[in-house]
């Protein structure tokens, strides 16, 4: 993801564009505003990205690489399914905390109006993350670490914790549970899918 504002010009352009696209929208953001935020001229932007569309697509590619790198790095080490999942969620939450403006950009691009922005399939990034969690959960079930259940349900119960805490951090920073809080909530879900007799399903309120 784009680093600090005092990095190389290309990265600074990515960072400035990301913040402007997230707060103003793609259509409302001009090349003049982007280069002005960095303190360079338009030809410098054209040299690196050719156009505003090229800059937008490069920004999305940076985000994709960051997610892919986090997924690969956090799952490459040893450990049980639970340990690998905790390592993955910890890496993703750390990435989120360090680059919240990038998350705002993705949310604005995914949920907001297109406003002429280049077509990007953000579902690819989302599906990669979800499918990775489902695969590790399935491995945990096969090894007897988790009780047998619908892989989709167990994976999404875990993902719901992380997603909710990220949304809370974005909307109400003062209420953010931080990673320690996320870990406590994940422990509750892990307890629910631990081996043993499943809880009796209630049929009435």
Image (cartoon, rainbow, N blue to C red):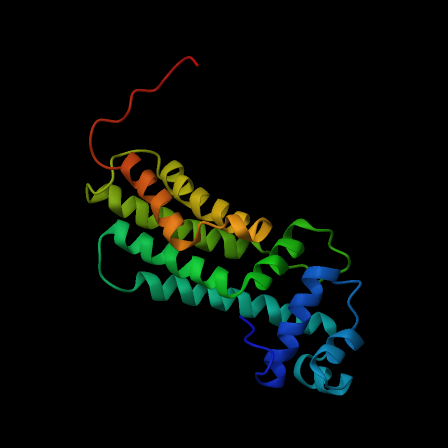
Picture quadrant where residue 109 is located:
bottom right
Left or right, 91 with respect to 127, comes to left
Left or right, 42 with respect to 162, comes to right
Can residue 193 be seen here? The reply is: no
Q: Identify the residue at horizontal 51%, vertical 57% (top origin).
A: 125
Q: Nearer the viewer, residue 179 or 22?
A: 179
Q: Identify the residue at horizontal 27%, vertical 37% (top origin).
A: 191
Q: Is residue 2 above or below residue 21?
A: below
Can residue 94 be seen here? The reply is: yes
Image position, residue 78 (x, y; %): 22, 61
Picture quadrant where residue 190 is located:
top left
Left or right, 68 with respect to 149, comes to right
Image position, residue 120 (x, y; %): 63, 59
Q: Nearer the viewer, residue 189 or 117?
A: 189
Left or right, 35 with respect to 65, comes to right
Image position, residue 59 (x, y; %): 61, 69
Residue at the outermost front position: 174
Image position, residue 85 (x, y; %): 32, 52
Q: Is residue 202 above or below residue 2?
A: above
Considering the image in quadrants, where does the C terminus appear? top left
Picture quadrant where residue 189 is located:
top left
Q: Nearer the viewer, residue 60 or 22?
A: 22
């Amino acid at each position: 993801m784009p680093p600090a504002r005092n990095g190389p010009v290309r990265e600074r352009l990515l960072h400035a564009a990301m913040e402007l696209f997230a707060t103003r929208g793609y259509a409302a953001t001009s090349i003049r505003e982007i280069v002005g935020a960095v303190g360079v001229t338009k030809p410098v932007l054209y040299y690196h990205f050719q156009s505003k569309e090229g800059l937008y697509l490069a920004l999305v590619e940076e985000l994709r690489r960051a997610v892919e790198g986090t997924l690969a790095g956090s799952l490459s080490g040893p450990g049980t399914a639970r340990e690998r999942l905790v390592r993955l969620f910890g890496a993703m939450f750390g990435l989120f905390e360090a680059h919240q403006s990038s998350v705002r950009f993705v949310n604005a691009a995914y949920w907001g109006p297109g406003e002429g922005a280049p077509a990007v399939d953000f579902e690819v990034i989302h599906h990669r993350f979800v499918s990775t969690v489902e695969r590790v959960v399935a491995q945990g079930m096969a090894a007897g670490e988790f009780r047998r259940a619908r892989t989709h349900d167990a994976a999404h119960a875990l993902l719901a914790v992380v997603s909710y805490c990220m949304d809370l951090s974005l909307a109400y920073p003062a209420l953010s549970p931080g990673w320690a809080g996320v870990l406590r909530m994940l422990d509750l879900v892990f307890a629910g899918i631990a081996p043993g007799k499943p809880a009796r399903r209630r049929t009435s309120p």
